[in-house]
Amino acid sequence: MIVLAVNAGSSSVKLQVIDTAEDRLIGKVMVECRGITHDEAIARGLDELNSPAIQGVGHRVVHGGDRFSGSVLITGEVIRAVEDLCYLAPLHNPVNLAGIRACLHLLPDVPQVAVFDTAFHATVPPAAYTYALPRDIAAKWKIRRYGFHGTSHRYLTERFAALQGRPPSDFNLITIHLGNGCSACAVEKGHAVDSTMGMTPLEGLVMGTRPGDLDPAIVYRLLEWERLDIAALDHLLNHKSGLLGLSGLSNDMRELLRLESEGSEPARLAIDVFCHRIRRYIGAFYAILNGADAIVISGGIGENQAAIRSRVCRDLQALGISLDESANAQCRGREADLSAPAARTRVWVIPTNEELLIARDTAALIASRNGHLDGQAV
Ligand code: AMP
């Protein structure tokens, strides 16, 4: 099936056309939204792609709340449910919806599917997803950890198992997505059981411009001390913190490593804090899983930065982790086992491919719907 995978963000729309019969990428394009609507951006992207007839559209939707534990065909009811969840993801769900509406308008006869960043985490148990807040307030606002990057963590889980020639249920994994956004996931026998991200994608690991874990008192003290309003605080935590805020220099890990090698102390501290947080969660998830078969690293930083992988995995022999430094140094943007031969816990790099999973889910749901309709016709 020829599927269009749509990732609609606030500043750009990323489109990929994938032939799911062969897992083949036919074309991809990114269109900046500055000054144009999502309708115009997607129309321009489709023009540029000049692809064969599209038979299905799969949309990345960031927040599925506790409503969606898997991908679904888009109906009016699904759109209303995603609208209802906008209060939990005000930066993401509204733009994802704009992408959905644009495609319904531009490709009205093509079935569309929503693939949620939260869905893979639906198996996380209450002990891991519940915040220790008063239960009536938590229930009223559905305050709990949802986890994000689920499509990436699911891809890494399925791909790792496929590379071993065994089912995902054979493995306990710690999957780590290190891009501009960063998260880790504890995966027990193929199912997520804990995540670093919380009610929103702010919690957990240090990210390009987000701080990850913070003492919550810092947040309300800042409102008072800096006389910030909520919007300014939201901006500080989503766009000014993380590697960028820590270093005062850049959110780009390539740039930070270069500056560190030239002697920049702020760059060194930013990278140290980044790596320390990842190590802390590797330890936590190792305990939650009662041991892991492998750590699977991905994302722009994870796939390309041997120096970061090396700093993250250093001195973890107690957890059975030991890198083959030469295999690590040679791995850039490709699948590889980086572990020393005797290491009990393997360390793998697997480039993530969220679009491929979006396309596969889309094709599967449309095929089962068509089968269902054919069945009715007979
Ligand atoms: P992502 O959000 O997955 O695109 O990752 C963005 C982060 O990955 C940035 O911090 C980049 O510095 C880093 N990154 C992306 N591509 C590369 C590359 N080819 N080499 C080194 N770092 C990279």
Image (cartoon, rainbow, N blue to C red):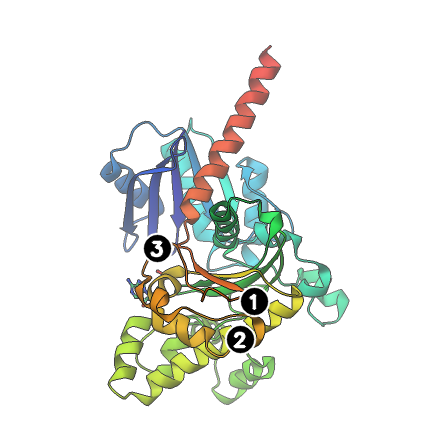
Tell me: 301 left or right of 293.
Answer: left
Q: Position of residue 164 (x, y in %)?
A: 50, 48
Tell me: 131 left or right of 195.
Answer: right
Q: Is residue 2 above or below residue 281?
A: above
Quadrant location, ligand no. 1: bottom left
Disc 3, disc 2: CB below 8 Å?
A: no
- Identify the residue under disc 2: 317
Circle count: 3
Spatial distance from mark 1 to mark 3, Cα to Cα? 25 Å
- Identify the residue under disc 3: 334
- 173, 149: nearer the viewer: 173
Label whose residue precedes the other's in the sequence (3 or 2):
2
Which residue is situated farthest in the top direction here? 378
User: Would residue 306 be visible to someone looking at this image?
Assistant: yes
- 240, 148: nearer the viewer: 148
Using the rendered view, name the quadrant where residue 261 is placed: bottom left
User: Would residue 239 be visible to someone looking at this image?
Assistant: no
Using the rendered view, name the quadrant where residue 51 is placed: top left
